[in-house]
Image (cartoon, rainbow, N blue to C red):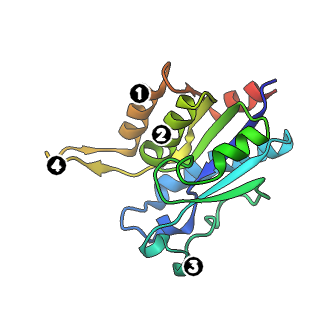
Amino acid sequence: MTPTALIVIDAQESFRQRPYWQPQLASAYFAAQNHLIEGARSRGLPIVRVLHVDEGPFALASGFVTPLRELAEFDPAVTVHKQRHSALVGTPLETWLIREGIRRVIISGIRTEQCCETTARHASDLGFEVDYVTEATLTFPMTHASGVTLSADDLKLRTELVLTGRFATVCSVEQALARVG
């Protein structure tokens, strides 16, 4: 079995303060994310908490850089604060993963096409095996400059397309947990 860690990216109250927050999209995410957390915990996997720190509701002083209240509680093996899209830039995460002998990471969290995808690509480039659990990621519709709006499902599909076979194994919660054993 490949030593594996679950990474929960930016699942923080800061997002609830954004105008694009949509509770109806978040409910399915919470169900999948919490199932993944519970499955990782029951298998003894280390769980990494990543929190984005920046300005506004992402500033530590805002009080919103805390886990989303619907998120299953867990004791993180390590918590990192990031200021870039990749959880591996400017944080001690890569060093921690190497020190702990981790070779596979399971990516989950917020936002699908931004911090989750960027972290998956970066981890792959560093030589880690990456399981990308799309159903345990959350994103929101985005509008292109042309006026075309991509739904959250469109963005998730696009992310799966560009990651599969190049940067990650795209899998369901059940598949990611089965790969752990």
Q: Nearer the viewer, residue 55 or 35?
A: 55
Residue denoted by label 3: 63
Residue denoted by label 1: 162
Q: Earlier in the sequence, mark 4 or mark 3?
A: 3
Disc 2, SS: helix
Q: CA distance from mark 4 to mark 3?
A: 33 Å
Q: CA distance from mark 4 to mark 2?
A: 22 Å
Left or right for 122, reference 93: left
> Which residue is drawn at the image coordinates 64% and 43% (left, top)?
94
Q: Is residue 39 above or below residue 3?
A: below
Q: Earlier in the sequence, mark 3 or mark 2?
A: 3
Q: Earlier in the sequence, mark 4 or mark 2?
A: 2
For the residues bearing labels 3 and 2, Cβ distance under 8 angstroms: no
Amino acid residing under circle 2: Glu
Amino acid residing under circle 3: Gly
> Which residue is drawn at the image coordinates 75% and 60% (left, top)?
73
Residue denoted by label 2: 117
For the residues bearing labels 1 and 2, Cβ distance under 8 angstroms: yes
Q: Nearer the viewer, residue 25 or 39?
A: 39
For the residues bearing labels 1 and 3, Cβ distance under 8 angstroms: no
Q: Earlier in the sequence, mark 1 or mark 3?
A: 3
Disc 1, SS: helix
Categorize mark 4 by other alpha carbons within 10 Å: few (<14), some (14-19), many (20+): few
Disc 4, SS: loop
Q: Is residue 85 visible?
A: yes
